[in-house]
């Protein structure tokens, strides 16, 4: 199923000492880019979280946020580095003596110094990777569900617009032979008028007119457009990321329509080309949202 590149999901997982809260957001991006933000004490899990997220999301910018909430009464007391505290105390006493100041050294001053109160080491914490992955998986599942819903809406819109584009192409196809015939007639009349009474080989004149008229023939472009329509419909039915392929097909469709506009010297065809280009631009904007 086709998925949108934009979406949101959240998940959580309980542990004996607290719970993980995970949010994941995705937006449009030409390539796949995953950013993981999690508490410093769980940075060791970043690689695994990035890996599981990248396996699920192939295209788009992904922001994964992990929060940790400790359970009530589960807060850990930071270890005290007595050696560091004694060292700071001795240093302050020596400094006060040297500067001939009153040695009023408060506990708050010592505690505020670096490394006196330490963060709990990772080795003292249990391995919570399974719980983090559980919360991330739940968030990714919710994200997938949203992206699938939006993807279905995008596919429906693209099919309708593609059908409208095909109807415009059908009108050009019906008009194209008349454009060539009218161009041949006009061109022959101009040549005869310019050359006046000059004797011309009728067969040679017909060949030259036919060659010039061929320049406004858009049959090849119309055939290629039909081929691209078939590929477009087949791509929409694929159960895999197809955003890049659809983007390429949109470029090819636009190329053929531009060529038709430049070759067909006809007001009716030109008006149809303007409508087709407007529809192609709307389709291109939608394709930009597809993974």
Image (cartoon, rainbow, N blue to C red):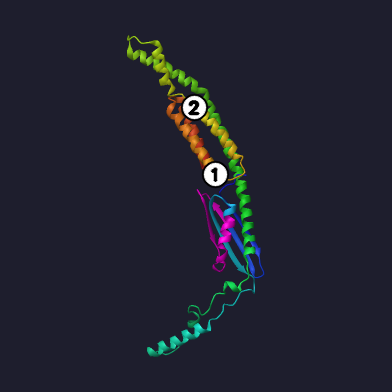
10 Å crowding of disc 1: few (<14), some (14-19), many (20+): many
Image quarter for residue 261?
top left
What are the residue bounds of the magenta stretch?
24-53
Q: State whether residue 282 is above or below residue 125.
A: above
Point out the tag, 1 or 2, that comes first from the N-terminus: 2
Residue 254's disc number:
none
Give coordinates of residue 117: x percent, y percent.
53, 78
Q: Secondary structure at mark 2?
A: helix
What crowding class fits label 2: few (fewer than 14 Cα within 10 Å), some (14-19), or many (20 or more)?
few
Mark 1 and mark 2: Cα distance apart in space: 27 Å
Image mark for residue 220: 2
Query: Which residue bears the numbered disc 1?
Result: 243
Tell me if 108 is positioned left or right of 101 in this view: right
Does residue 92 appear in the picture of this structure? yes
Please tell me whether residue 29 belongs to the stretch shown in magenta.
yes
Q: Residue at x 60, y 49 (%)?
A: 147
Determine whether, in the image, residue 160 is placed left or right of residue 178.
Answer: right
- The residue sitting at 61% across, 72% down in the picture is 125
Residue 278 place in picture, x, y as percent = 49, 35
* Relative to 288, residue 197 above or below: above
Corner quadrant of residue 24: bottom right
């Amino acid at each position: 199923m086709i998925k949108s590149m934009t979406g949101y999901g959240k998940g959580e997982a309980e542990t004996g000492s607290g719970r993980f809260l995970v949010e994941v957001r995705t937006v449009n991006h030409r390539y796949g880019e995953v950013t993981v933000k999690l508490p410093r004490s769980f940075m060791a899990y970043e690689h695994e979280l990035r890996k599981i997220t990248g396996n699920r999301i192939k295209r788009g910018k992904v922001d994964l946020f992990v929060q940790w909430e400790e359970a009530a009464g589960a807060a850990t007391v930071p270890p005290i580095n007595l050696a560091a505290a004694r060292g700071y105390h001795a240093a302050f006493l020596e400094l006060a003596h040297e500067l001939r100041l009153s040695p009023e050294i408060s506990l708050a001053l010592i505690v505020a110094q670096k490394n006196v109160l330490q963060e709990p080491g990772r080795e003292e914490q249990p391995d919570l990777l399974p719980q983090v992955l559980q919360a991330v998986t739940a968030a990714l599942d919710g994200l997938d569900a949203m992206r699938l819903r939006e993807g279905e809406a995008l596919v429906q819109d693209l099919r309708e617009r593609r059908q409208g584009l095909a109807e415009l192409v059908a009108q050009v196809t019906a008009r194209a032979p008349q454009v060539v015939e009218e161009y041949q007639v006009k061109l022959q009349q101009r040549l005869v008028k310019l050359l006046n009474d000059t004797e011309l080989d009728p067969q040679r004149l017909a060949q030259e007119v036919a060659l010039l008229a061929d320049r406004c023939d858009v049959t090849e472009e119309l055939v290629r457009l039909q081929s691209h329509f078939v590929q477009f419909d087949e791509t929409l039915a694929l159960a895999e990321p197809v955003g890049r392929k659809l983007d390429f097909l949109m470029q090819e469709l636009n190329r053929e329509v531009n060529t038709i506009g430049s070759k067909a010297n006809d007001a009716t065809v030109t008006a149809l080309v303007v409508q087709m280009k407007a529809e192609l631009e709307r389709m291109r904007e939608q394709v930009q949202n597809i993974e």
